[in-house]
Image (spheres, rainbow, N blue to C red):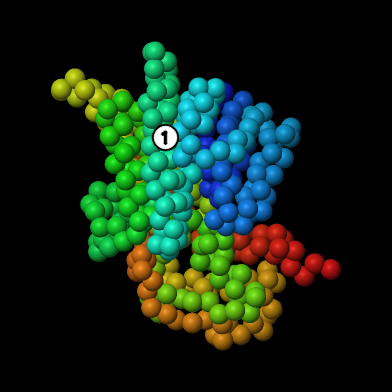
Amino acid sequence: MNPINLSNKTILITGAAGFIGANLIKSLLHSFKNIRILGIDNLNDYYDVSLKEYRLSQIHALSGSDAVSGTFQFVKADISDKAVIEVLFQLYQPDVVVNLAAQAGVRYSITNPDAYISANLEGFYNILEACRHSYDNGAKGVEHLVYASSSSVYGSNKKIPYSTEDKVDNPVSLYAATKKSNELMAHAYAKLYNIPSTGLRFFTVYGPAGRPDMAYFGFTDKLRAGKKIQIFNYGNCRRDFTYIDDIVEGVIRVMQKAPERALGEDGLPVPPYAVYNIGNNQPENLLDFVDLLQQELIRAEVLPKDYDFDAHKELVPMQPGDVPVTYSDTSALERDFGFRPSTPLKEGLQQFAVWYKEFYCIDKK
């Protein structure tokens, strides 16, 4: 692997106002001297824009403080706009690119497929093309492209835990198909243009200021409003929940080690390409998860102590596009980066519950 010192580098991060993107930027600013970060996000209304603006306000406050030596600049832009991406690459000439911008969500891909083609396929193509042309005229260009894939690519795989060595040819949602396509596109560009690229298959990321469309956040909203929550597959689902701080730590470690460039026997590049799982390597039963969430919401006083939880849950069948279990094999991540996520679910949900109470000003008097 080729080591990369991120200090004094220019880093382009798409999806900068997103859950992972915003937390990644804050951690990079804290961790590396004179780092220059350009963040891109279209601030779409797939979920509450005020939450995205809240994340950005935290970054701007940090980047303008004496606590960090790096800088952050934000551009409201859509990665599906090729002309904009070309101009930004020409102006800023990023050393490392982290593509986190995407239309997320499994169920939404059933009702609004166009958004996934635009963001996940056209958008990622534009990033790959910009990386390709960053080497024009002998320029040093992009040293490492890191991009978000998803545990959804494993689809209907029966073998667990999910390994990056497994074949992933059975997607059960358009979202999963676009993420698998990203991996294939990155491989082709790595082979053709020698672009060092690493894909990261994220497993159910959660934590403070997370995505409201994720189950733990949606459950909290509904329970607080006195509505029933639906627990799919009659509670017989298991998810590999991964705390946001673990995800960020993993991404930063990966950013600093790019796949090595080399030539094959045919004189052409051996693709400098890799894919890793980032998950907690410990799937949790959905009913146990919901019980833990309830406990932490009561502890944080988001819900009253006498909350009748049983009256507010409904066991329902599996939804189209969902899978019964996600379970990550993180041995490759441990081998190459000496890291594996380890935050216990109870601790992560506690942090979320405390943040939720503060953000929504519950019991404010």
Answer with left or right where residue 288 lies relative to residue 185.
right
Residue 4 seen from this side: no
Q: Residue at x 50, y 50 (%)?
A: 246
Residue 91 seen from this side: yes
> Which of these two is toward me, 364 or 114?
114
> Which of these two is toward me, 332 or 70?
70
Place residue 352 in its image quadrant. Answer: bottom right
Answer with left or right where residue 335 lies relative to residue 89.
left
Furthest-right residue in this view: 365
Place residue 362 in its image quadrant. Answer: bottom right
| Position in image of residue 331 (x %, y %) | 33, 48
> Which of these two is toward me, 54 or 294?
54
Residue position marked by numbered label 1 in the rendering: 126
| Position in image of residue 124 (x %, y %) | 41, 39
| Position in image of residue 360 (x %, y %) | 71, 63
Q: Residue at x 57, y 61 (%)?
A: 212
Q: Is residue 324 above or below residue 141?
A: below
